[in-house]
Amino acid sequence: MTSPSEVWPENLETHAAFEGGCTCGQVRYRLSSRPLIVHGCHCTLCQRQSGGAYAVNALIEQDRVEVLSGSMRVVRVSTPSGAGQSITRCETCGVAVWSKYHALPKIGNEVLFIRVGTLDDPATMPPDVHIHTSSKQPYVTLSEHTRRFEEFYTPQSVWSQGSIKRYSEVVKTHGLG
């Protein structure tokens, strides 16, 4: 099965889906490639932080994200894993633009979790997989064809071959192996 993040347009520079920003417009950013994968995360932490039933996050290497404008502040919060999370927010309006989840195996500090709702065209990045569905709200219905996990998963068991290769490059480049 091909995931949504594997079928995006090749000409990223002219596609609005790859730019985004905060509510007030001060922060603007651009993605230089497809993400590694897009998660629909149903953990209770994402529910609380997003104010919704779940969060949609596009995982991408931080060197593939260009900040075009704006000042941001980083807020560190605790997580059930104990590893913590750093949330990057617009300094003016406070919207969370992305996070770093420090517990992600080997690359937690090198991969950003872009809040898909901050993209100019978030409809182009539907989740490839839903995670932490054990805490999914009962009113959320997932298609029978939706890949899902009650908790998390091993990236190598879910990600595309291209994403696994990129993952390996990040590990190698940053001496994390």
Image (cartoon, grey):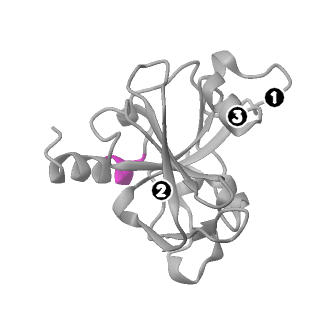
Q: Position of residue 127 (x, y in %)?
A: 63, 45
65 left or right of 2 in image? left
Q: What secondary structure predominates along the stretch shown in magenta? A: helix
User: What residue did someone put label 1 on?
Assistant: 140
- What is the distance, in whole Å, between disc 2 and disc 1 at their CAs? 25 Å
The answer to whether 146 is drawn above or below residue 71 in the figure is above
Mark earlier in primary sequence (3, 1): 3
Circle 1 Cα neighbour tier, 10 Å, few/some/many (<14 / 14–19 / ≥20): few
Q: Are marks 2 and 1 in contact (CB under 8 Å)?
A: no
Is 78 part of what is drawn in magenta?
A: no
Which residue is at a point 64% across and 61% down the rendered structure image?
A: 92
Q: Which residue is mark 3?
A: 54
x, y percentage for residue 78? 48, 26
Please report whichever mark, 2 or 1, sits nearer to the chain's N-terminal start.
2
Residue 11 in view, yes or no: no
Residue 35 disc label: 2
